[in-house]
Image (spheres, helix red, strand yellow):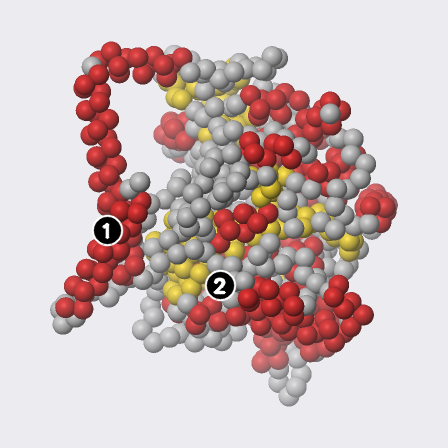
Amino acid sequence: MFTPIRRSLASAAGRRCHRHALHAQTIPTRTTARSVRVVTYTTTPRRYQDAFPTQLENSGSAPFLSSLPGATSTPQTLTEKVVQRYAVGLAPGKKVKAGDYVTLAAHHCMTHDNSWPVAMKFMSIGATKIHDNRQVVMTLDHDVQNKSEANLKKYRQIEEFAKKHGVDFYPAGRGIGHQIMVEEGYAWPGTVTVASDSHSNMYGGVGCLGTPIVRTDAAAIWATGRTWWQVPPVAKVTLTGILPPGVTGKDVIVALCGLFNNDDVLNHAIEFTGSEQTMRSIPVDDRLTIANMTTEWGALSGLFPIDSVLVSWLRAKATTSAMLNPELGGRGKFMHAKIDELVNNPLTADPGATYAKSLYLNLSTLSPFVAGPNSVKVATPLKDLEPQSIKVDKAYLVSCTNSRASDIAAAAKVFRDAAKDGVIPKIADGVKFYIAAASVLEQAAAEEAGDWQVLLQAGAEPLPAGCGPCIGLGTGLLEPGEVGISASNRNFKGRMGSTEAKAYLASPEIVAASALQGKITGPGWYQKPDGVEKVIIGEGNGDHMHDKAMSIEEALDKIISQADGMIASAEKEMLGTQAETTADDASEETLTEILPGFREKVEGEIVFCDADNINTDGIYPGKYTYQDNVSVEQMGEVCMENYDKAFRTIARPGDILVAGFNFGCGSSREQAATAILAKKIPLVVAGSFGNIFSRNSINNALMGVEVPRLVQRLRETYGGKDGEKAPTRRTGWKFVWDVRRSKVIVTEGEGGETWSQKVGELPPNVQEIIARGGLEKWVKSQISNS
């Protein structure tokens, strides 16, 4: 009831501030950028303590997922509006909002090399027919260089399965799945499209809400057409200014990852916004790059607006399709009539929509950036790295992030500009430069422009259109002691080869210039605007007056909260001490129902992996991900190998694994969860989890709980011990999770302090999935019982 009042007061206060500013124009003021903190959700929403939607294949479960009534006047974010379109079984009048669980019927679902494991799950649950074969797309892209009989057999099985079910199928060498989804029009503006890969965020570059799912979810979609999703808190990222010459979309996202590097958008949906002038400076290819790497920033989606830039791009696609494929007629995916619908029925965020947080970046103040080594959270201006003359052994223009025709053209221009008497210069001695187009269509466009040939003349080694080195598969991986620079999206330790190598990320032109010079450098295209000395970023919208109004609204929120507290205190005084005691007793007696056979307590010795952002490559190396014949015992042996090889001998069955914050970030591979189970570790405790790891954990019956205080205590105890921080350590501490009482009990070593803390509930419906051995077995049991 207070919300309209707050908005009115804040708006009025903002107007008063504006009038005051007009009257005070003659008074000298500071003009430095000012960041204003807004009311935010936690960046790590609790994943295990909320009610879990237990029905995947039964549409009757939808009201349970979305039963809370919603006010029809509730303004929605763009993300919420798109989800509203694809959420099924909503209660009448229900408006989707952040935090809601929904049953989601995605527009499309893409699987890649993991299609056969998904098919095995699909068949194992008793499903025989894909619910909607027009919903499903299969692409082969990850391990396309692998010509072993085992891999070729898997590829044949996927193709045969796709043909049997009438599913759109793209063979090995055709291109990377995410690029295919965009260039073939599956990822359509205003829709929800999912894929069993963490870089599904890329679809946001064309105004499509793309978000990752895991293999078990994909199998459920094949069988039922639906899956579950919790709408994340939504973060608004306002871009101001315009990109200077020589600055690219890759520089934008590398800077965002490195400058907002405290999990600012972890497990959020991002909406990029800005003035028409600003957005016109960001072409669609750059938007795809930015959206793609919102995954590395920690987000679950990265959505750009459906604006004039996108519409122009779509029009060009539609015109080309009509000219080259007239036989498609009204069956084409890119058609002017469909684009007219987008223009005539614009989909935008409502004025007054609630965002969990707001950040801004002034593009005009941005210069070329490089990420690394071995972390996207370390971003350095190129001008600061160039004087260090960092030697480069390998350079990569590969991946769905930056290997489109425009990227290849930028790299080719570097060599053309350096040509003398028309002779294209060679890459530096001792450097290997690998190139792979995002798709055969993009390669064909680059060949037609002559750009592909320029890179080959310079000495680049071509690879087939596919993921290859980006995922750590095939030719050209980094060897121990080598330094690589890549236009791809991840530079986690061991991701692109040896854990003893160093990997940097940069734009295609920086990668090309570095290959040419043999050290990290740029082509010299950047033109610094006058008066720019540093990157201007902050919290808020980058608009001083608007942010000031928001800060006033926040102050009013605080006053109202204090008033609520005063009322609560008065009620306690009126009711007396007995009321307080009764409330405490009631809290003590609130017990979680435990299903028959489910453990009431999970306990063990703590083995501590003292690091934040331990990613899925660290937990389960990419080189094993697409080997379907890895035994459970082998999975246990290589668990955490890329993080710490000593983990194999230090951790024991029954241990409780405790790690820092954002545990399990990175890719969607479910083996990150199953490898821990293979190590016979039943429970992972962390300061916070990456969302997709949480989802994989539930789906694969690995339990997890967030206890930030425990991480803090372990670091206080062991942070400086013996002069060096051990990556993995046996602690002698005992951890007990009392599931019935939603409480953890920690004993800090023999004779040490014992303390307890309430944690989120593990409700019976989640217990049921875990007790069954995971979502796949749960769905199978539901099908057999129906």
Quarter of the figure with residue 273:
bottom left
Single out the mark in the foreground, 1 or 2: 1
Q: Position of residue 30 (x, y in %)?
A: 20, 64
462 or 161: which is nearer to us?
Answer: 161
In the displayed structure, 492 sits above or below 306; it is: above
Sequence order check: which comes first, mark 1 or mark 2? Answer: 1
Identified by mark 1, the residue type is: Leu
113 or 329: which is nearer to us?
Answer: 329
Q: Position of residue 752 (x, y in %)?
A: 37, 15
Identified by mark 2, the residue type is: Asp
In the displayed structure, 48 sits above or below 524; it is: above
Q: Position of residue 147 (x, y in %)?
A: 82, 51
Q: Residue at x 49, y 42 (%)?
A: 93
Q: Residue at x 58, y 44 (%)?
A: 87
Q: Residue at x 55, y 48 (%)?
A: 83
Left or right position of 138 against 265: right
Which label number is shown at residue 9?
A: 1
In the displayed structure, 433 sits above or below 467; it is: below
Structural distance between the alpha carbons of marks 1 and 2: 39 Å
Which label number is shown at residue 539?
A: none
Q: Position of residue 167 (x, y in %)?
A: 79, 50
Q: Quadrant of the C terminus?
A: top right
Quarter of the figure with residue 615:
top right
Residue bearing mark 2: 251
Q: Residues within 10 Å of mark 2 (few under 14, many from 20)?
A: many
429 or 326: which is nearer to us?
Answer: 326
Q: Residues within 10 Å of mark 1 (few under 14, many from 20)?
A: some
